[in-house]
Amino acid sequence: MNELFRRILWLPVQGSTVAGEVDALHYAVITITMIGATGVFAAALYFTWRYRRTDEAALTPPIRAPLLLELAVVGGLLCLFLLFWRVGFQQYLRLQSPPADAIEIYVTGKQWMWKFAYPGGQRTNARLVVPAGRPVKLIMTSRDVIHSFYVPAFRIKQDVLPGRYTTAWFEVVRPGVYPLFCAEYCGTGHSEMEAEVVALSGADWEAWIAGAEEESMAAQGLEVAARRGCLSCHTLDGQRHVGPSFRGLYGGVRQLIDGEAIADEAYLTRSMMEPAAQVVAGYAPVMPTYLGQLDAGEVAALVELIKSLRHPNPPPPGVDYPPIAPAAPTEAAP
């Protein structure tokens, strides 16, 4: 029955673990809607015949529906709406909550291409390589305008915003090649912004990772931090300096001068692009903006560096730290 519905509606194959749930809700909504529309049409035909005027002088008799019938109809429609909402909201929460063991891949949209960066340092253009049977978390941003990451077979679509990180996740059920599109009009080359998701079996994925092994993204982030001057204000070993230390920063709750925020990918990115928007309490807002100075690859590498320092492991070698100044009440935001 599921395959029959899919073919009738011309839907692509169900390529992810959530595609079946999304389609089931789709089928239920369409079926109930069609049944309701058919019932309304049948009732309209019946009333047209039943209450037709047979005599020009005859008056239409008053028609009063029982109160219980009206309450049943209104209450039934309301309950049906709430049922659809509940199922849809549960699916939304699941789509927004990637598993803790998901493989993280950075996605960058630009006019008119998709670029991908992997934690091992590998990079691909227009081809997202993932393992089948394992959850994959996408951390996405744009270099220019709003794009939208859309894989029809996975039933996922997520807007990709310039200067921000948004996330999505999926788990491919079987190896194969799945088309990837941009679903947000992004300029004259929008229709040509195509790519593909290549899902590999476990052994093929491990072979691909080994064959494409490069310097890790966290190591690349260390080089970016040194080259861009981040280490002149931020330390890697937990010591307080002009700005907060990178160690233990990711995932923590940051006390801001006007509230608090979780230091996730979106927060870290905004701290680089709009440092004055979220100033940490106890630090002066002296950090300059890096909007237009850091490309998407450098931002992703810095985020991975900070994420690698969330655990109490030794600081990365190879960097000469600047002298640590005594803490003062006028210090910089991250």
Image (cartoon, rainbow, N blue to C red):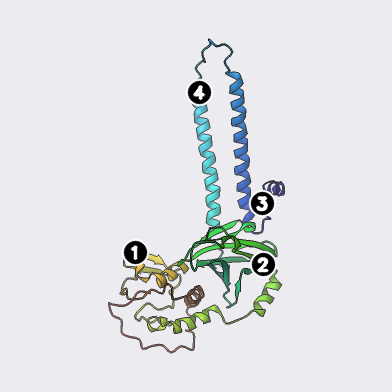
Depth-wise, is mark 3 or mark 1 nearer the camera?
3
Tell me if residue 319 comes above or below residue 25 in the rendering: below
Say which quadrant the C terminus sits in.
bottom left
Query: Amino acid under label 1?
Result: Gly
Name which residue lies at 46% across and 88% down. 319
Q: Quadrant of residue 287?
A: bottom left
Secondary structure of residue under mark 4: loop
| Residue that numbered label 3 is attached to | 11
Query: Amino acid under label 4?
Result: Pro
Tell me if residue 16 comes above or below residue 328 in the rendering: above
In percent of width and height, residue 99 lies at 56, 64
Depth-wise, is mark 2 or mark 4 nearer the camera?
2
Tell me if residue 291 comes above or below residue 97 in the rendering: below
Name which residue lies at 34% across and 64% down. 259
| Residue that numbered label 4 is attached to | 66
Secondary structure of residue under mark 1: strand
Secondary structure of residue under mark 3: loop
Mark 2 → mark 4, Cα distance in angstroms = 60 Å
Query: Amino acid under label 3?
Result: Leu
Mark 2 → mark 3, Cα distance in angstroms = 20 Å
In percent of width and height, residue 231 lies at 41, 83
| Residue that numbered label 1 is attached to | 259
Mark 4 → mark 3, Cα distance in angstroms = 43 Å
Secondary structure of residue under mark 2: strand
In percent of width and height, residue 13 lies at 68, 55
Q: Tag 3 or tag 4, which sits nearer the N-term?
A: 3
Residue at the top extreme, as displayed: 57
Neighbor class of circle 3 (other Cα within 10 Å; few <14, some 14-19, many 20+) is some
Q: Tag 1 or tag 3, which sits nearer the N-term?
A: 3
CB within 8 Å, label 3 to label 1: no
Q: Quadrant of residue 214?
A: bottom right
| Residue that numbered label 2 is attached to | 198
